[in-house]
Image (tube, rainbow, N blue to C red):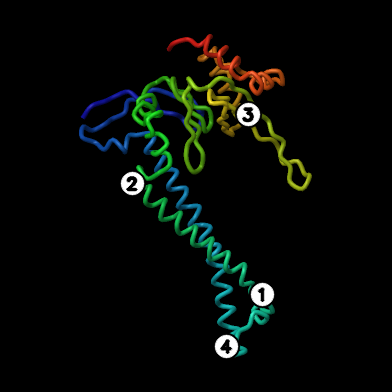
Amino acid sequence: MYQSRGLLISESTGYGILFNKIEFTGGNKMGKSFVYGQIRRASRNLIIVNCFILFLVFKCVRKDIMTIIAVKELVGSISIYDLKYYGVQLPIMFVEIIIMAINLWNIVRGIKCLFEPKYHKIYKLLSGGYYSIEAIDDEMSSNEGERFGNTIILPSWVIGKTYFGITVVKVNDILWVYKKTTKNYMNCIPMGKSFDLVMGLSNRGFMTVTMRQKYVDKAINYIKDRYPWIITGYSEEMNATWERRFYEFSSYVNSNRRPR
């Protein structure tokens, strides 16, 4: 048995603190892996959500089946008009059965990924050569990471946790970071605001992570201090440069990049 230092990320404060982690020689690497832990979490969430939906849809289908049986016993024969009269809509019932089949497929897929992580899309994404599960796990076990809500910023990686998985991007691929505020409405009634951390990438794509406003502001300030070559903040002029003169935008950021 031996001790090694790791990073314990507090769920309540959102900040990393050092701790001594007890590990056993010959232990299961999967059990200590951050990435494999996220695969298990995403798989569990997939199973739970689909079991809940399956239960609700099954209740509706069961009600329709019981109605069909009762109508057959009552009138002796069943027609579409009889079923409509008693509230059974066959097209809707057919859709419900399809939904149940999809739920069952997702449950089976979730169980499979729970025990065999290599089948999960997270594993496939991070094992493609450009990303590295081992590199992410190594940095997660260091004391150099910071957590901002559902987003973890490591020296070489930015990881955004979602309910059914994670999104990963290399810090070296980030050119531009800014906060996006969206006003939400339902039937013309204001339903508050949502806040996103938007990262413009070297492939002209964007990675967006939704989080609380205070975490977005802290994450942007952290990136600004730790990676000063990354452009922070949004303006119409900046957006126009990104869209019309992306090569100049990218060249400017890369020319100011500092080796770490």
- Alpha carbon distance from label 4 to label 1: 16 Å
- Element type where label 2 sits in the image: loop
Left or right: residue 166 compared with residue 28: right
Is residue 148 among the parts visible in the rendering?
yes
The kind of residue on which mark 1 rests is Gly
Dot in front, 3 or 2: 2
- Alpha carbon distance from label 4 to label 2: 48 Å
Dot in front, 4 or 2: 2
- Element type where label 1 sits in the image: loop
- Alpha carbon distance from label 1 to label 2: 44 Å
Circle 3 residue: 213
Circle 2 residue: 116
Circle 1 residue: 87
Circle 4 residue: 73
Query: Which of marks 2 and 4 precedes in the sequence?
Result: 4
Residue 2: where, in percent of width, then height? 23, 27
